[in-house]
Image (cartoon, rainbow, N blue to C red):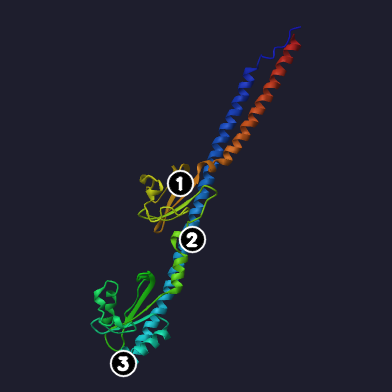
């Protein structure tokens, strides 16, 4: 009787099994890679949409508050103009002007003549000021010529401490001239501070390695997850300038030693850039592939042993 040979392998069968297992691994790798990429893109896009919605909500809130603030300030300026119409002498009565200022709950009251020269004010040193002398006050000169004129200027920093201040003006009712009030829009100021775009993306992360960057349309960074480079060009973050072409796009780049998938899109007056580290993006795929490779090796080993035993058994019987 012939002794069985363990080393004689059924190469044809094993080759087929190996090819099937390898094909299965390649297909799994391809499908899991595509699934991971789609999942990563969706996750980044959701983060970008969240930030875009936050910016729009902030802008809408500020717009609504600004309309309310402007309407109230115009009403106060017209009320002051009506008081002057009833008693023009109060223009030169500093005590009465101070009482009216407190009544209207504003910080400053100003009245000009038909030449745009300040003739009455709660701030005595301002008397004699020419509205035509400064670009900020010059637009109010139209109140001299148009009886229905009204203007609430956008809030802007004033003085050494850059306090947010707003001026509103209407036409005088008793004669040609300007009636103006000045005040600190506290509610609007608080809303501006809360809606500061630099805070929108700060601290926001997509999973562990994902980040968000918000820029204006010129590429100046307005907000970012880590707060770095605010006010500087996006290239300071490490991006090559040619990465951003058109209103939206996607690319991979190594920034700060981390290779990531980046997606960018223009929303209104901003560009939002979202990212996710490739290692984290493919983490589940890699874990699944390790399991499949180990399983495939185990299956191939078991099948090899099975076929060897089967082959040897057949040879033993035939011998």
Task: Give the position of the N terminus as an image quadrant.
Answer: top right
The residue indicated by pointer 2 is 54
Numbered disc 2: secondary structure: helix
- At horizontal 44% and vertical 59% (from top left) the residue drawn is 198
The residue indicated by pointer 1 is 262
Numbered disc 3: secondary structure: helix
Task: Work out whether residue 110 or residue 179 is closer to the camera in this orientation and state it.
Answer: 110
User: Which mark is nearer the camera, 3 or 1?
Assistant: 3
Numbered disc 1: secondary structure: strand
The numbered mark at residue 89 is 3
Q: Gap between marks 3 and 2, in whole Å?
A: 51 Å
Residue 258 lies, with reference to residue 98, above or below; the image says above
Residue 70 lies, with reference to residue 35, above or below; the image says below
Q: In the rendered view, does 93 fall on the left or right side of 114?
A: right
* Mark 2 Cα-neighbour bin, 10 Å: few <14, some 14–19, many ≥20: some
Residue 12 lies, with reference to residue 71, above or below; the image says above
Q: Gap between marks 3 and 1, in whole Å?
A: 67 Å
- Sequence order check, earlier mark of 3 and 1: 3
């Amino acid at each position: 009787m012939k002794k069985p040979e363990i080393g004689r392998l059924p190469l044809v069968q094993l080759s087929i099994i190996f090819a099937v297992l390898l094909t299965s691994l390649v297909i799994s790798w391809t499908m899991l890679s595509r699934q991971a990429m789609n999942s990563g893109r969706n996750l980044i896009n959701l983060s970008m949409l969240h930030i875009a919605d936050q910016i729009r909500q902030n802008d809408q809130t500020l717009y609504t508050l600004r309309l309310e603030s402007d309407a109230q300030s115009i009403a106060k300026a017209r009320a002051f103009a009506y008081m002057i119409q009833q008693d023009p002498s109060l223009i030169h009565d500093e005590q009465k002007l101070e009482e009216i200022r407190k009544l209207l709950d504003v910080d400053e009251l100003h009245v000009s003549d038909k030449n745009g020269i300040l003739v009455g004010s709660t701030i005595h040193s301002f008397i004699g000021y020419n509205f035509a002398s400064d670009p900020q006050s010059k637009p109010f000169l139209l109140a001299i010529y148009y009886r229905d004129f009204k203007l609430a200027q956008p809030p802007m920093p004033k003085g050494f401490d850059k306090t947010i201040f707003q001026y509103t003006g209407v036409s005088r009712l008793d004669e040609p001239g300007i009636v103006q009030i000045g005040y600190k829009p506290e509610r609007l100021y608080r809303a501006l501070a809360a809606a500061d775009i630099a805070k929108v993306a700060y601290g926001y992360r997509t999973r562990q390695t994902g980040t968000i960057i918000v820029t204006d349309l010129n590429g100046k960074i307005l907000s970012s997850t880590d707060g770095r480079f605010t006010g500087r060009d996006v290239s300071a973050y490490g991006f090559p300038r040619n990465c951003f072409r058109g209103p939206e796009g996607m690319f991979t780049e190594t920034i700060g030693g981390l290779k990531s998938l980046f997606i960018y899109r223009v929303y209104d007056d901003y560009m939002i850039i979202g990212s996710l580290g490739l290692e984290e993006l493919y983490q589940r795929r890699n874990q699944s592939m390790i399991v499949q490779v180990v399983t495939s090796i185990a299956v191939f080993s078991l099948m090899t042993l099975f076929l060897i035993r089967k082959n040897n058994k057949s040879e033993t019987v035939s011998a």
